[in-house]
Structure formats: C-alpha cells, structure tokens
C-alpha cells in the first residue's frame, strides 16, 4: 500500500502564494506519476497538475498554467505544488494522488489514479 499525506494548505489573500507538499510512503513502483487535483464545494474533482517521477516531466491543467508549478524531491519522496497569483476561484480542497501507470500516460481523470491523500484546504480571499 501507499500512504500520501498532504500539508501546506491555509488561508491566503488573492494574489498571494502557497506551497503544498505531499509525502509518499509505503510500496514503490518502477514508473509512475504523481498528480494534484482539487475539489471546490459542490463541484467535481478537477485535475491540476502531474509529474512523472522518474523523468520529472510535467503536465498542467489549463486553469493553472503559468501560475502553479509541480515539482518533486526524490530523496524525500515528496511532491510539491507551488501556487502563485492565487485567485478566489482556486479555493478548494487539494488532493495528491498516484497513478501507477503514469510512466506512459498523462491522466487527468481522477478514477485513473490509484492512491489518494486525505486532502488539504486552500482558501483564497478576495
């Protein structure tokens, strides 16, 4: 099994920044991707960004391109989401997830991810 633990959420004013972290532990895989999703109240879960663990290549959802950056620290088994120029519409619970087949595909669909963290709340005030 894999355990994913997010941290770093909080309250920030519009235009501000936050950095989320997701620490992974447990079983390892030869080739996978880590992703971030978010879910606002009353809305469906939305893809934010993903990173292939081995190569570090990244993929972003249109709504966050140019503002958010996903990265990873292999030694710490941690993936990060740096969020800049935050907007009130970025308010959501943010989840990290692991796609065991992420070495060969970019998945933006939540049901294709195999493991999930508990989520961390991000609130952006106007």
Image (cartoon, helix red, strand yellow):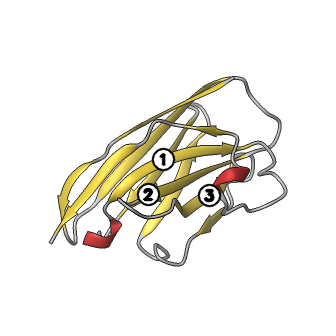
Cβ–Cβ under 8 Å for marks 2 and 1: yes
Q: Hey, which quadrant is residue 123 in on the image?
A: bottom left
User: Which residue lies at the image location 52% right of the left edge and 56% below the top edge?
Assistant: 37
The residue pinned by badge 3 equals: 50
- Mark 3 or 2 closer to N-term? 2
Let me know if residue 67 appears in the view. Answer: yes
Residue 19 position within the rendered picture, expressed as x and y whole percent measured from the top left: 35, 51
The residue pinned by badge 2 equals: 39
Residue at disc 1, secondary structure = strand
Residue at disc 3, secondary structure = strand
Let me know if residue 87 appears in the view. Answer: no
The dot on residue 95 is: 1
Q: Nearer the viewer, mark 3 or mark 1?
A: 1
Q: Hey, which quadrant is residue 26 in on the image?
A: top right
User: Which residue lies at the image location 52% right of the left edge and 57% below the top edge?
Assistant: 70
Cβ–Cβ under 8 Å for marks 3 and 1: no
- Mark 2 or 1 closer to N-term? 2
Q: Nearer the viewer, mark 2 or mark 1?
A: 2
Q: Could you classify mark 3 by the number of other residues whose Cα lies within 10 Å: few (under 14), some (14-19), or many (20 or more)?
A: many
Residue 81 position within the rendered picture, expressed as x and y whole percent measured from the top left: 45, 54
Marks 2/1: CA–CA distance: 8 Å
Residue at disc 2, secondary structure = strand
**Image height check: is 24 above or below 38?**
above
């Amino acid at each position: 099994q894999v355990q994913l633990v997010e941290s770093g959420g909080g309250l920030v004013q519009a235009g501000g920044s936050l950095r989320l972290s997701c620490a992974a532990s447990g079983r390892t895989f030869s080739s996978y991707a880590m992703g971030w999703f978010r879910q606002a109240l009353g809305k469906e879960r939305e893809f934010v960004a993903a990173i292939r663990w081995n190569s570090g290549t990244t993929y972003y959802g249109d709504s966050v391109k140019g503002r958010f950056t996903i990265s990873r620290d292999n030694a710490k088994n941690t993936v990060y989401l740096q969020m800049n120029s935050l907007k009130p519409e970025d308010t959501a619970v943010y989840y990290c997830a692991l796609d065991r087949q992420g070495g060969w595909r970019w998945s933006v669909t939540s049901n294709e991810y195999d493991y999930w963290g508990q989520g961390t709340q991000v609130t952006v005030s106007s």
